[in-house]
Amino acid sequence: MQGSVRILPVCFLILVVTLQSHPFRALMPHHTHWFEEWFDEDYLALYAHRDPKEARRFVDALWSALDLAPGVRVADVPCGAGRHSLAFAERGARVTGVDLSPLMLRCAAEACRSLPAPPSFVRGDLRSVPLSGGFQLVVNIFSSIGYFEDEAGNRAAFASLAGLLAPVGVLVMDVIHPAHLRRHFVAETRRELPDGEVHERRELDEGRKRVIKHITIRRGHFERLIYESVRLYERDELAAMAEACGLVPFAFWGDYGGEEFTSESPRLILLARKKTT
């Protein structure tokens, strides 16, 4: 085993199995969607800058703006490595996290295991979240909608999230602001990892309203190729999807501190409440 595992300071992951233990990974034929295989150790290494401090800032802003209190039921979907689930649980929320990646769920459970009342974590698909509902708050954070090439799949995911809400519950959906992405678009970058290097090539497909990323990770003689494709949503599109699911948009934020959305904002964050009957 020595040489096939490395310790990386990424998120909450303690032990990371590197690509050296999967030398043929990049050569294997792919018969699945990109998001079914990507969210693993390499993803955590690439997005290590998305840390608990950033998550707590966002949770603090939501807690104050929505006047939340300990005991509130929160669904974090998808929860990833659990940084937002942790931040909500630290404040006394009753949290359930859902993710498709078994590794992410293990990382999330490890991150939260020392809490007096840790969240529960469940494996599930965004298009049909395996929860019964009744949540006062449902959060979908860090551009986690729009994975599906067919818009019907994305609408199904939105409807599934909306269906988890209790009466007058709030859905929070966070995506990148398309205009900000276009203004600051960088087609190609290279950067170092603790044990390798990453080459990222990006393209904007305006016809399909998608941002596409081709990622190459190299560690010694080993190479892994990764493909990402995420739908870009404008403010009016998010509002229309919310309304189609019986929600009423009441705010749009432009960053994780709760600032009002403007044309210059880096993020586009929808806050929508379930309609009262």
Image (spheres, rainbow, N blue to C red):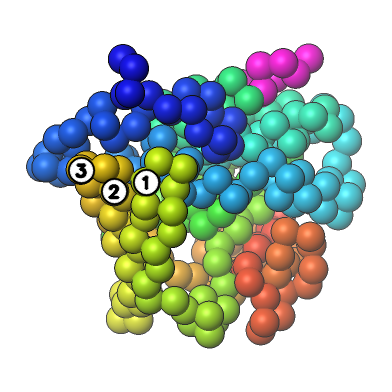
Tell whether 207 sits left or right of 8: left
Figure check: 122 above or below 251: above
Give the alpha-carbon distance from disc 3 to disc 1, as whole Å: 10 Å
Q: Looking at the rendered structure, which numbered label has been put on residue 221?
A: 3
**Circle 1 residue:** 196
- Residue drawn 31% across and 57% down? 215
Horizontal side, residue 52 vs residue 223: left or right: right
- Residue 55 percent location from the top left of the image: 70, 46
265 displayed left or right of 71: left
Instruction: Kindly identify the amino acid type of the residue bearing the numbered disc 3.
Output: His
Question: Label 2: which residue?
Answer: 218
Which comes before the other along the chain, label 3 or label 1? 1
Locate residue 148, reporting x and y percent: 33, 55
The answer to whether the residues at label 1 and label 2 have Cβ atoms under 8 Å apart is: yes
Q: Amino acid at mark 2?
A: Arg
Q: Position of residue 260 (x, y in %)?
A: 78, 72
Mark 1 crowd level (few <14, some 14–19, many ≥20, 10 Å Cα): few
> What span is in magenta?
112-121
**Is 14 one of the magenta-colored residues?**
no
